[in-house]
Image (spheres, rainbow, N blue to C red):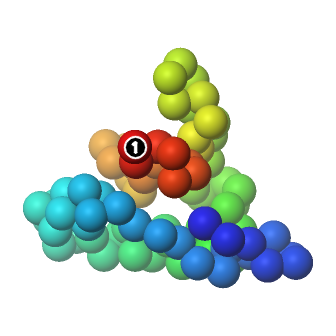
Amino acid sequence: MREDKEGRVKSVNYSKKFLKSLKRLPERIISEAEKKEKIFKENPFNPILKTHKLSGKEKECWSFWINYSYRIDIGTHDIYK
């Protein structure tokens, strides 16, 4: 994830594992994830996303909600190792 001077997200990198998992989701969830990604790029802490820091072994990562059942986790490249 890279940000511009105004704090907007310029780009998002996806792991192969994430993209493979995304394809298995229902179309309505994929569509909702795309909408939330656009919001995330404009303002990562928009209240509609419920962005929050994770804990435990993933304490360097963040997450935001797609809906009540699905969320997207965000972190550095290290989370994919």
Q: Residue 62 is drawn in which quadrant?
A: top right
Q: Residue 29 is drawn in which quadrant?
A: bottom left
Q: Residue at x 58, y 78 (%)?
A: 11
Q: Residue furthest top?
A: 56
Q: Residue 6 is drawn in which quadrant?
A: bottom right
Q: Residue at x 81, y 70 (%)?
A: 7
Residue under pointer 1: 81
Q: Residue at x 79, y 78 (%)?
A: 4
Side (left or right) of 3 relative to 67: right
Q: Position of residue 80 (x, y in %)?
A: 40, 48
Quarter of the picture holding the C terminus: top left
Query: From the viewer's perspective, is residue 47 above or below residue 81?
Result: below
Q: Residue at x 51, y 45 (%)?
A: 78
Quarter of the picture holding the N terminus: bottom right
Q: In the rendered image, is residue 17 in sight?
A: yes
Query: From the viewer's perspective, is residue 15 above or below residue 70?
Result: below
Side (left or right) of 8 relative to 37: right
Q: In the rendered image, is residue 22 in sight?
A: no
Q: Nearer the viewer, residue 71 or 3?
A: 3
